[in-house]
Amino acid sequence: MPRTPEDPSGLALARVAHDLRDTVGLPGGTAWEPKWDGMRLLALADGPATVLRSRHGVDLTAAFPEIAAAVAHRVPAGSVLDGELVVRRGGRADFGALQRRVSAARPADLAAELPAAYVVFDLVQREHADLRPLPFIERRMALEEVAAGWTGPLSTSPLTGDVDVAARWFRDLAGAGVDGLVAKGLDQPYRPGTRDWRKVKHRSVVDLVATAVTGSATQPGALLLALPVGGELVPVGRSQSLGLAAGLALGRQITPLAPPGGVPSAIATRIAPLVVEVSADVPWADGALARPVQFLRARPELHPVEVEPVPAAVVCG
C-alpha cells in the first residue's frame, strides 16, 4: 500500500552532515532552517476532526488541545502540516518541559503552565491536493500562503538561503533551544522515508541506543549502549551511574524485555531499545566508547534506526 501524507512512516528525513560546508549545493540551491529541540508532529487539518500525530503515529490531539484548536480554525480542511512541537520557557525551546507535558497523566491539564507551540516547516497536502512531488520552494510558498495571519501557537520556521546567515544561526541560536540546522534543496520533492535533507547538530551531544540497564528497570543504575550497524545493534559501551532522581525518571520511560531463555541476568536487565542523548566529550577507540559517558536525556520520540553513526572526528577522539 503506498504511503499517504497521513502516514507518519512516510515522513521525509535528514541525514547527518558533519559540517555546514557539507550542506551547500543541494539540488536547486540550499535553504537552511533552525533544527528545533522539540518533537516532530504531523497536523491533519479537518475542522473539528483535526488530528495531531507524532512521527510514530501516536495520537496527541487530546494532549495538545491548544494546537489542535488552532490548526482546526486556521488551516484549510484536507491540509497536512509537518513541523516541530515545542514548549518554550524563558525564551527558549525546553525539551524537558515538553517531555514533562507529554508524559503527564493528563497532559492537557498542563496547557496553562506549559503552553505548546507548533513551528511548521512543510506543507505536504493542501486541501486534499498532494504537494509532495513539488519542489520544496513551491511547497514553502504554499505554506506561507496558508500561514498568512497565523498568531498564537502556530508559526512557520525561519528560512534562509544565505550561508552566512545560516552560520550565524548555528552559532547564536543554541541558547534559544536550537540544536543545529536542517538544510533542504530548493528543488527537492518531499520523498517519504528518504534522507534527502541534511542536518548539522552541535557536537556537545551524541544519540545512542540503550539496550539494557544495570539494576532494575524501574530504577536503573546505568545504561548499556549500542549503535545500529548493518541492521544490528552493536554494543559500544555504557553510561556513568545515573543517580537516584535520573534513574527513577528514566524508569518511567523504559520497557523491560524478557531475558533470553527466560533466565534473568544478575548483571543487566534487557529493555526495549530506547534512543538516549549522551555527552559527546568522551573519546572513542576502535568503534567503542573509551570510558562511560554522561547520560543527558531520553529521546523516546526517535526510533533506533534514526541514530546515525558517530562522526569520524568524534570516534578518533
Image (cartoon, rainbow, N blue to C red):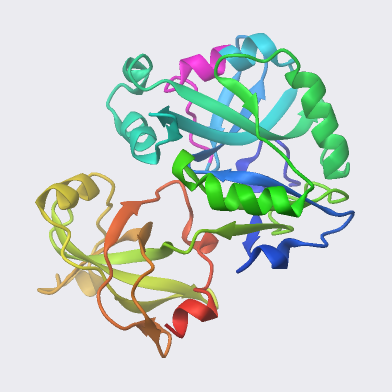
**Left or right relative to 8: residue 258:** left
How many marks overall?
A: 0
Which of the pair 80/26 is nearer the observer?
26
Q: Quadrant location of the C terminus?
A: bottom left
Give the image quarter of residue 210: bottom left
Residue 308 lies in the magenta-colored region: no
Asked if residue 307 lies left or right of residue 258, the reply is right
Q: Where is residue 190 in the image (x, y as percent from the top left)?
A: 78, 46
Image: 154 above or below 196: above
Q: Give coordinates of residue 257: x percent, y percent.
A: 27, 60
Residue pictured at 88% horizontal, 41% vertical:
134
Magenta: main secondary structure equals loop
In the image, the segment drawn in magenta is 57-69
Q: In this view, does 174 lie above or below 209?
A: above
Is any atom of residue 232 visible in this view? no
Q: Is residue 111 visible?
A: yes
Left or right of 233? Residue 265 is left
Q: Where is residue 146 in the image (x, y as percent from the top left)?
A: 77, 20
Residue appearing at x 53%, y 19% in the figure: 67
Q: Is residue 263 left or right of residue 304?
A: left
Q: Could you say where residue 277 lies in the image, as x and y percent from the top left? A: 37, 58
Q: Which residue is drawn at 82% across and 60% down?
A: 26
